[in-house]
Amino acid sequence: MVVEIPTSSSSLQVDRDRPHNEYLGKLLRHSEGQTIRTYPEISGWLQELRQKAAYDVVRQHLPTRRDEDWRFTDLSALLAIEFSPAQPVKVDEKAIAQFILPEASHSRIVFINGIYAPELSDTSALPEGVFAGNLTQLPLEDSYDAMKYIVHQDGEKEVFTALNTAGFPDVAIAWAKRNVIVETPIHILFLTNPETTPTFCQPRGLIVAETGASLQVIEHYGVIQENCPDMSSDRPYFTNSMTEVFVQDNARINHTRNQRESGDGFHIGKTAVSQKRNSHYTCNAISCGGKVSRHNLGVWQKGEQTETFLNGLTAIAKEQISDTHSAIFLDHPHGTTDQLHKCIADDKAHIIFDGKVFVPQNAQLTNAAQLNRNLLLSPKARVDTKPQLQITADNVKCTHGATVSQIDTDELFYLQSRGINLDNARNLLLDAFAAEVLDRIPIPSLQKNLAQCIACRTF
């Protein structure tokens, strides 16, 4: 038996003396009105969790450009819109056909407006020992274990993360048990069905690989509409997402995060990763959509011999704003981290990259590398990049850097001299630039789709 629980915290009030807090208060009240279905045995814990998160929200303020971590990200377009909570809706399978990957056609879970849609999901290809579904489907005994993971990451008190915790309507779960190797990719589809009035939804994800397990997960954020997502349909919406990832001892997770919101959409997402001893985590973060988008990625290495590989690609045009803030915290010897983030900006697009790597005294014999490469296709495009290393250990190998450039005219001339016209030559160079990241995605059909999307957006 399952029950529905609300967040009963309507008496909480934000500090109105702080900037934009009346707007934040409205978002909190919308969050408080969301219900979640769960077992009665854990309903009290979940309600207390949401109540604490609501208190965390009211103690903070909506970030502005006066805040250091947000000084390049302009949220004024978001603040100009009044959002209402997204409602549960039914859509048919034809509406999601374009999102289905052949490699995961029978290993997908679908969430519409943040709520699980079992009629659109299919996990028949998954082996025994792995669970993919939502919190209600999770067996009760495993729900007790889920209590050890949900909201147990560092940084959960950050304002948008706390707002998600205060009102997420469901939880998408991909969970591999001890020593289970899952070769079939699990596809988590978070889709928004926009309405005539602006809507606000808060998807939540939990990905767990227990000791010795291996998982491959694709997390996709998109919109259900007939035309290309880049085309405006005058139906704005706001997605505020949070995904927690736990990689236990000797476990492996390959995580692809594909943000493909519409040109009317606003997206703020958080990915928080915890890695234990001898674990391996790879994140392929692709961001092409959204009018304004931001991805906060935090990785905490909590054991020796831990490997972290972060691959990112942002490709935007028109007047889009895309912000990536990443932080890697190493706290044990023999850690390895390698981050490559590439950006393509066209028209009047604005890209922000802020990457931090912390190497304290405990993290001796660490090998850390970070590189951000940016390509501007228009004189009005803009990039703000800030790669950072904070090192207090003395026996480490660490590098970081950033480049900002345009398409090399000599390379264009060389290709044209071989009989390739200007447009095709430009396309070849862009393909080569993006391929270094796209080739690391282990899903061939997704690689192809993303390559076509990027080529379409930059012409």
Image: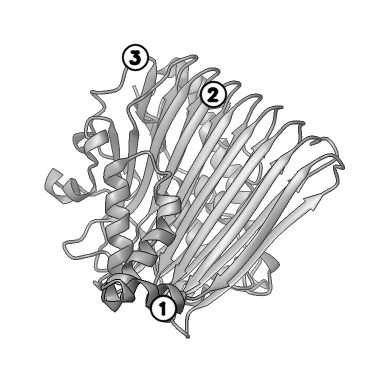
Task: State the image quarter where residue 217 is shown.
Answer: top left
Label 2 belongs to which residue?
Answer: 251
Q: Residue furthest bottom?
A: 379
Q: Secondary structure at mark 1?
A: loop
The answer to whether residue 20 is above or below residue 130 is below
Q: Secondary structure at mark 3?
A: loop
Q: Is residue 33 visible?
A: no
Label 3 belongs to which residue?
Answer: 128
Image location of residue 362, percent across then percent down: 83, 35
Q: Residue at x 35, y 47 (%)?
A: 220
**Of the residues shown, which amino acid type is indicated by label 1?**
Glu
Q: Is residue 185 visible?
A: yes
Foreground residue among 8 and 350? 350
Task: State the image quarter where residue 188 is shown.
Answer: top left
Q: In the drawing, what numbered circle is on residue 240?
A: none
**Of the residues shown, which amino acid type is indicated by label 3?**
Glu
Whole-angstrom CA distance, mark 3 to mark 1, is: 47 Å
Q: Residue at x 19, y 35 (%)?
A: 119
- Of labels 1 and 2, earlier in sequence is 2
Q: Residue at x 54, y 35 (%)?
A: 281
Mark 1 or 2: the one toward you: 2
- Of labels 3 and 1, earlier in sequence is 3
